[in-house]
Image: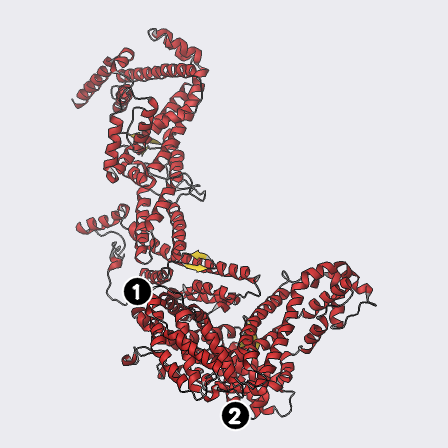
Amino acid sequence: MSRSVLQPSQQKLAEKLTILNDRGVGMLTRLYNIKKACGDPKAKPSYLIDKNLESAVKFIVRKFPAVETRNNNQQLAQLQKEKSEILKNLALYYFTFVDVMEFKDHVCELLNTIDVCQVFFDITVNFDLTKNYLDLIITYTTLMILLSRIEERKAIIGLYNYAHEMTHGASDREYPRLGQMIVDYENPLKKMMEEFVPHSKSLSDALISLQMVYPRRNLSADQWRNAQLLSLISAPSTMLNPAQSDTMPCEYLSLDAMEKWIIFGFILCHGILNTDATALNLWKLALQSSSCLSLFRDEVFHIHKAAEDLFVNIRGYNKRINDIRECKEAAVSHAGSMHRERRKFLRSALKELATVLSDQPGLLGPKALFVFMALSFARDEIIWLLRHADNMPKKSADDFIDKHIAELIFYMEELRAHVRKYGPVMQRYYVQYLSGFDAVVLNELVQNLSVCPEDESIIMSSFVNTMTSLSVKQVEDGEVFDFRGMRLDWFRLQAYTSVSKASLGLADHRELGKMMNTIIFHTKMVDSLVEMLVETSDLSIFCFYSRAFEKMFQQCLELPSQSRYSIAFPLLCTHFMSCTHELCPEERHHIGDRSLSLCNMFLDEMAKQARNLITDICTEQCTLSDQLLPKHCAKTISQAVNKKSKKQTGKKGEPEREKPGVESMRKNRLVVTNLDKLHTALSELCFSINYVPNMVVWEHTFTPREYLTSHLEIRFTKSIVGMTMYNQATQEIAKPSELLTSVRAYMTVLQSIENYVQIDITRVFNNVLLQQTQHLDSHGEPTITSLYTNWYLETLLRQVSNGHIAYFPAMKAFVNLPTENELTFNAEEYSDISEMRSLSELLGPYGMKFLSESLMWHISSQVAELKKLVVENVDVLTQMRTSFDKPDQMAALFKRLSSVDSVLKRMTIIGVILSFRSLAQEALRDVLSYHIPFLVSSIEDFKDHIPRETDMKVAMNVYELSSAAGLPCEIDPALVVALSSQKSGMIFNHIFKCLLCVQLFKFVIIIAGTWTISVHKTQTSPFWNLRLVEITEPFSIVQESPFLTMDLLESCFPYVLLRNAYHAVYKQSVTSSA
């Protein structure tokens, strides 16, 4: 096949454009990181801030790019010492600048080749070629602008070169050209305007081809609304028809990218603005839409000021300067409101689109173009708002604060999720489309070509064959499709057929170009859905606007109607890694860490907000539950009695107390209570938390629900402890029954959370309530078990031993005694059977076991003191042990005993503790019998059927199980453990027990004798019953003890004493009645 000297296939225009565009983005990434590092004092190269090198750096920058080392030894002396380290540490910076220079050389060479080949550019025909050409020019322009913004570039390059010369005796071979480039591009756009004079024809042709595309994309919201843009239901009859366009790839082309092409492109070839009205209209339209452009990431370019500064020095450009000023005024006045209305329209349009597609995902096939158009439109508006928010006049600031931006981002994420979820549906549709329609139409177009050279014919035939061979079975079998080769071949074919004097000119066969552009879009729907999502909806730019990102999130949470969309912000963190580039791998960890920290912060704040709402609801419910407590009914009963007896009490006009439940009476549906508002806000926020089960950010999986679960556990723990209202100073604490009521109200609210979020509240209850049965929780904080245990031991039982409270067996409770100093609490309200049962419900078997062990520890300490008293009186007690039948000698020996009152007091304390423990055990038994009756009965069977010959260790295990269930045992395992900790010899323990019994028995005899004397001397004593209780106590002891018998008691304490006591009481009662 005959070709001209410059054969397009040999120039490899498609390959060079692809490679240079990718490399240009990599170079931008590296320059961006250098700029940010140099702007951060912590990351800045140390040589630029080293005081010892300050004079050398200033000298190098002043002389740049000249190199003078001979006559400046004093200034460069310090540099001589650091030369090796400078070469090592600045190499990455220096060679990045060298790479920029080489990239510039390659771009200039390619642009010259394109000019020589007289390539035809039309975005609607050879889309890939034109787009890549314009992208390359913008990348090149951006790169040179970003380079000029690195203030330390001369210092870095100069330092490296001086160190190189001092080390190797000569400058680096790239330095002369590099230094000259830095100087030439001090004002990059001015230099490039001169440089692009020969490229003006090609560039202006490419830009003017946007005359149909850009104005159509840059319409107002009202025009979109009138055209019913993106609506699937506006024309139901055509709902199943495939969305078609002659310019398929242009429909979702980024508006931001087009504005950069137009503004930068016409600045570089500004001459066309004076001669072509179409070019001027395009340029003015772009200038009116924005005040600044995004150069790269968060680097922005203020277009009006820059363009005016460039044109002001060009003769005859006064009219263009006036155009710029008029456009600036228009942008400042109208751009904000125009884009605000666009975002408002897109919110409703995307909502409709997402709703329809979620119901009918099959429409993703024919209407895929609508989805990617919607994503692209929304992405452009979000990026526009982001870059303008901090770069607009204060007077129009309201147009740049969008509190509903979260809703727009959310619907974008919903559409992205539909595309990922229903990818196979789209594959099936477009595989059939390609094989059944596109292949046929393309084959007809190829057959109808008047001229089709061999190379082009081979490529076109391969397209047809590739599409014809497709089948639905490949999708069903899960085959991986890859059409990248086909797309690259079409790119090559565009290059071949777009040069001048091409045998097959694409300019003369526009239908072929438009058809192939459509086919390329269809192939992307089969194998490149993820890449399409990145191309049309990537919002990784938020990574570089952290402050604005966080502010938007806070505004979203503060607005109840928007909180349901707050999950969009953590989901955006999944985009961040797509902005990294392989030419700058070192930033991956930095961006990855930022994405993780932001995602974690967002999810944590959402969970905190939900937790706070739940806490407020719980507080309200606890207040309502508190109104139902028995203590609040007295006033109501009193009012009812007084009303019945027609007694007028209180002041006139005193409002009648509202009864519990009145808050549920609604006279008007429009009346909204605080509880209603809380529930509404909670349901909105929980929708967001429950939206996705998990998300993957930089290979880390986040589960939003777990954040809520964790926060609920922490708050529930703090709330339970807080509801005890324990005051260490005043020793006040909530009654167990009231705390139980509050906890149950709290748990009821938490259980209702399962209606909003799919979390396991039972797990929360188990984790929290089980921790509350231990002495300390998992954070080392005190629990209700420790608080109540301390209160009962240190407050209630201590007052018993002080004589302010007594145990009343008939009531099975401790009661206050009349004393001079009234106690701040009523003992009965904390120790009766209902309160002890409530305590058992709260603490559970583990908590009650801890309470029991604490009680036994106190008994053990009293026993230790009793041992000391026995040791102190061991001689006297030994004699008394053998003198029971000698009353005179016993009386004399008793007088020799020391600390008699202490023994009685300590035995009283032990008795009080055991009485309280019996109440606690009985309450625990009642509670467990109610909750687990079958298990308790099984434990009783174990205990009641232990064979006598059973090993004591085995028996103790059964007793320990029984005691944990609240059952009484012959041997108390907790007491055994407590006493066994006092290590003494077996002989000593036996002697101690015997002598202690002697002393105690003597006390019983004295008490009995005292009572007998009091009966004969004081016949009218009102304390007979109490005395009778005292005298009958030994018999109660024998009855309760499995190891004592009545025969043993009779030998020591004859029953006749008890009979006489009863007889005396009877006689006195008869006398009194007579």
Q: In which quarter of the image is residue 69?
A: bottom right
Residue denoted by label 1: 672
- Element assignment for label 2: helix
Q: Nearer the viewer, residue 859 or 352?
A: 352
Q: Nearer the viewer, residue 70 or 332?
A: 70
Q: Which of 121 and 943 is in front in this view?
A: 121
Q: Is residue 737 above or below residue 33?
A: above
> Can you say which quadrant of the picture contains the C terminus?
top left
Which residue is at a point 39% across and 54% down the rendered structure image? Answer: 706
In 3D space, how far apart are the residues under numbered discs 1 and 2 (Cα atoms)?
61 Å
Q: In which quarter of the image is residue 43?
A: bottom right
Residue projecting furthest to the right = 71
The crowding category of the residue bearing disc 2, from other C-alpha atoms within 10 Å (few below 14, some 14 to 19, many at least 20), is: few
The answer to whether 562 appears left or right of 1038 in the picture is right
Q: Amino acid type of disc 1?
A: Val
- Element assignment for label 1: loop
Q: Can residue 502 be seen in this view?
A: yes
Q: Where is residue 392 in the image (x, y as percent from the top left)?
A: 53, 77
How was this image coloured?
Answer: secondary structure
The crowding category of the residue bearing disc 1, from other C-alpha atoms within 10 Å (few below 14, some 14 to 19, many at least 20), is: few
Which residue is at a point 45% across and 65% down the rendered structure image? Answer: 572
Q: Amino acid type of disc 2?
A: Ala
Q: Where is residue 402 in the image (x, y as percent from the top left)?
A: 44, 72
Q: Where is residue 850 in the image (x, y as percent from the top left)?
A: 38, 34
The answer to whether 587 appears left or right of 1026 in the picture is right
Residue denoted by label 2: 277
Q: Which of 41 and 905 is in front in this view?
A: 41
Instruction: Between label 1 and label 2, give the one nearer the viewer.
Output: 2
